[in-house]
Image (cartoon, coloured by chain):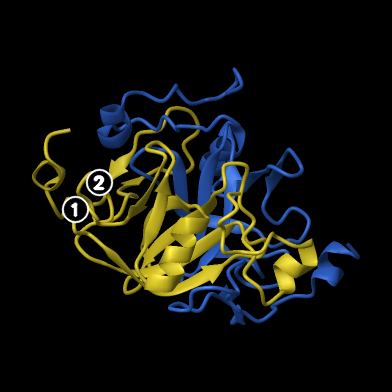
Chain colours: A blue, B yellow
Amino acid sequence: MSDDSPFRPAGSTSELEEGLALTPKFDAEGLVTAVATDAASGEVLMVAHMNAQALAKTIASGEAWFYSRSRRALWKKGETSGHTQRVVEMRIDCDQDAVWIKVEQVGGACHTGRRSCFYRTVPLGKPGAVTLEFVGERVFDPKAVYGKR
Amino acid sequence: MSDDSPFRPAGSTSELEEGLALTPKFDAEGLVTAVATDAASGEVLMVAHMNAQALAKTIASGEAWFYSRSRRALWKKGETSGHTQRVVEMRIDCDQDAVWIKVEQVGGACHTGRRSCFYRTVPLGKPGAVTLEFVGERVFDPKAVYGKR
């Protein structure tokens, strides 16, 4: 972790699991997993990552910030698209390496234009090659929002 | 990935995002992130990981299998505790590096005895040191289920 993390280092297992202090257990890349669900429907909207700075900014502002591993950059959700996430509730898991945020999602969470990134189901009970089924409709045109990619 | 993966290698971005083939984008450790939610309440129960074998077994059996990074082992959820997860629906995300399973959870998902691993909230709007709030009650006694640890 960088020296400017506002969080104390992760403690013992019992401190992590039963303690009152938020001491996130960041991985070797300085990240925790973040799951965003729709505060109204409960649908999982996206899975992303937060570094210490993204987590601190999300806690302080109540708006979702993440860290992009591919772009190696802090980003505020919706900064380009306008599709921001207001955080209604945040929870931390037992070993403090994952956060769950319940959000009010403006527009769509997924850069492909869907409300949720999880717009395809995986049929069960069929070993071998699996054909996905689309279940999520586009709620915006990604070309119009992000430009030609 | 190991040679015995039943999945084809991940394709191009457009194949991953708009294709009908399940071609998971496993990370350097051969894992995808797995989020389990309660099929009835929508609550996030746990965040874990699946390797190709765990994912294939989950798809074939409809019971949740994961891969433990700390134990470096495939495990069937509930194999020790009896707290299995029957998968009602599985979804894959846009870039196929995360799966969402909606499950019928027997007992509790968390090894600490709670229904969900996310049993503490993080207060928002309070920068700096954060005091967690417990919201999830124990539904089983972990010492009775797992023995003294």
User: Which residue is depicted at the point 40% across and 33% down?
Assistant: A22
Which mark is on residue B111?
A: 2
| Subunit ID for the residue under disc 1 | B
- Residue B143 sits in which quadrant? top left
- How many other residues sit within 10 Å of disc 1, few (<14), some (14-19) or many (≥20)? some
Q: Secondary structure at mark 2?
A: loop
Q: Amino acid at mark 1?
A: Ser
Amino acid type of the residue that numbered disc 2 sits on in the rendered structure: His
In this rendering, the answer to whether B63 lies above or below A134 is: above
| Apparent side of residue B90 relative to residue B40 in the rendered image (left or right) | right
Residue A70: quarter of image: top right
Residue drawn at the location 34% of the way across and 50% of the way down: B118
Residue in front for this viewpoint, B55 or A85 = B55
- Which residue position is annotated with label 1? B81
B115 w.r.t. A40: above or below: above
- Residue B86 location (% of width, % of height): 32, 70
Q: In the visual, does A90 lie left or right of A29?
A: left
Q: Nearer the viewer, residue B116 or A83?
A: B116
Give the answer, above or below, for where A88 lies relative to B145: below
Label 1's element?
loop
Nearer the viewer's eye, disc 1 or disc 2? Answer: 1
Q: Which of marks 2 and 1 precedes in the sequence?
A: 1
